[in-house]
């Protein structure tokens, strides 16, 4: 992902849509409207819930504060409770705004063990060092984390400040998935996307409930590259530029990711174990650069793409499984940071067929993240610190 500038927000939206070759945009009777209108926070990069049966939300700022908030539309900042504060131990600047707190995931058994996991750029380390750490809640207060419980799982040196990825998600198999970008700059200069010896440019899969010798986690025995020499056994899939948005469909279990493009194309992938998603030989479903590749059975093309005349920086979302807008059940929500457009992609996984790409009426905002509450209702956040939700159009 490049620095997400707000300058082009208006102009690109008015250009004719090229979109995917598979399907044109379909106007939708749904829109994106303000949620929690009395609340504004500094770069809310994650909005989620702890999965413990309590109807509350957890919002994490890219600057390091993680807060608990009641799931009520009239919530204000005074109603928030500080859950964990990592601001003093991470790195974030406006000039290098793809660092900081990038991912947060609660253990599937958080209610019993109080464990949660954070992906962030660590201050007391060489520049551009990312870590994934385990934290636990305080024994005195389950609504407060104890920073002293931090247990670093993985440390990832990054060559540059951008393309860190950062998303964390637990799969239906109980393993923790970690999305990592190619390490930054243009063109993937070190070829990390196609290099199985580095963790960069990959989605990792680890077992946080066991520990192998010398590690604070274990390698799942069925990870695809466990028995391959010169391959990191943590890798689940590779060939990514900068995954910005990773989530599992609650019903099908499929892993959806959005990968930010460089020159011409943005893409959405459904990730399979051991898959190579092409970067930097392919950009979406197209040859990339002079040394790139034409279509190749060993390189998996995206299920969806759109051209830079439509948008220039995809923000990945979630497959909707809520109840408030039943027409959109099964749709994958995604947005574009630069143009501020929002879509709901209807895809039949069994038939591997697209039904529609619904264009939702939305304010032209730089949307940076999607999230869900315990009822599977979908929310968006933007770079101005506002919150949004999906509703029928007037």
Image (cartoon, rainbow, N blue to C red):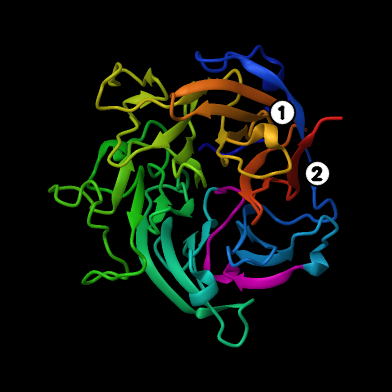
Q: Secondary structure at mark 1?
A: strand
In the image, residue 284 sits, relative to residue 390, either above or below, namely above
| Mark 1 Cα-neighbour bin, 10 Å: few <14, some 14–19, many ≥20 | many
Identify the residue at image location x=63%, y=14%: 17
| 349 left or right, relative to 46 | left
Residue 184 is situated, as x and y percent measured from the top left of the image, at 42, 41
Identify the residue at image location x=47%, y=54%: 168
| Mark 2 Cα-neighbour bin, 10 Å: few <14, some 14–19, many ≥20 | some
| 234 left or right, relative to 89 | left
In the image, residue 175 sits, relative to residue 144, either above or below, namely above
Of callouts 2 and 1, the N-terminal one:
2
> How many numbered markers are drawn?
2
Q: Is any part of residue 394 visible from this angle?
A: yes
Part of the protein shown in magenta: 80-97
Residue that carries the numbered disc 1 in the rendered image: 360
Q: Secondary structure at mark 2?
A: strand
Distance from the alpha carbon under mark 2 to that under mark 1: 14 Å
Identify the residue at image location x=85%, y=55%: 38
36 or 93, which is in the foreground? 36
Q: Is residue 89 magenta?
A: yes
Q: Quadrant of the C terminus?
A: top right
Q: Is any part of residue 263 visible from this angle?
A: no
In the image, residue 275 sits, relative to residue 54, either above or below, namely above
Q: Residue 34 bears which disc, if any?
A: 2
In the image, residue 207 sits, relative to residue 34, either above or below, namely below
Circles 2 and 1, Cβ within 8 Å, touching? The answer is no
Q: Is residue 279 magenta?
A: no
Residue 382 is situated, as x and y percent measured from the top left of the image, at 69, 44
Identify the residue at image location x=64%, y=29%: 343
């Amino acid at each position: 992902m490049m620095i997400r500038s707000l300058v082009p927000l208006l102009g690109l939206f008015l250009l004719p849509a090229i979109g995917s070759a598979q399907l044109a945009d379909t106007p939708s009777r749904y829109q994106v409207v303000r949620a929690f209108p009395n609340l504004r926070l500094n770069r809310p990069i994650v909005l989620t819930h702890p999965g413990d049966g309590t109807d509350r939300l957890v919002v994490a700022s890219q600057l390091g504060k993680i807060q608990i908030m009641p799931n009520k539309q009239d919530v204000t900042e005074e109603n928030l409770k500080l859950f964990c504060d990592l601001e003093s131990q991470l790195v974030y600047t406006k000039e290098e705004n793809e660092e900081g707190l990038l991912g947060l995931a609660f253990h599937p058994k958080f209610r019993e063990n109080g464990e949660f996991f954070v992906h962030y750029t660590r201050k007391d380390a060489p520049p551009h060092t990312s870590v994934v750490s385990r934290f636990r809640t305080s024994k005195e207060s389950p609504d407060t984390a104890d920073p002293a419980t931090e247990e670093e799982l993985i440390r990832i040196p990054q060559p540059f400040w951008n393309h860190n990825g950062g998303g964390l998600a637990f799969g239906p198999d109980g393993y923790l998935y970690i999305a990592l970008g190619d390490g930054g700059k243009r063109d993937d200069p070190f070829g990390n996307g196609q290099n199985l010896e580095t963790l960069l440019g990959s989605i990792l899969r680890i077992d946080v409930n066991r520990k192998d010798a010398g590690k604070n986690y274990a390698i799942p025995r069925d990870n695809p590259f466990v028995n391959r020499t010169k391959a990191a056994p943590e890798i689940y899939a590779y060939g990514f530029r900068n995954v910005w948005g990773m989530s599992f469909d609650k019903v099908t279990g499929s892993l959806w990711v959005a990968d930010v493009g460089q020159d011409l194309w943005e893409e959405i992938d459904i990730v399979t174990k051991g898959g190579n998603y092409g970067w930097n030989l392919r950009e979406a479903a197209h040859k990339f650069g002079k040394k790139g590749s034409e279509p190749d059975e060993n390189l998996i093309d995206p299920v969806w793409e759109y051209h830079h005349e439509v948008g220039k920086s995809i923000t990945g979302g979630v497959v909707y499984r809520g109840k408030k807008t039943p027409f959109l059940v099964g749709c994958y929500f995604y947005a574009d940071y630069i143009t501020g457009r929002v879509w709901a992609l209807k895809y039949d996984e069994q038939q591997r067929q697209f039904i529609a790409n619904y264009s939702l009426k939305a304010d032209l905002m730089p949307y940076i993240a999607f999230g869900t509450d315990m009822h599977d209702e979908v929310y968006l956040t933007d770079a101005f610190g506002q919150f949004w939700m999906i509703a029928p159009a007037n």
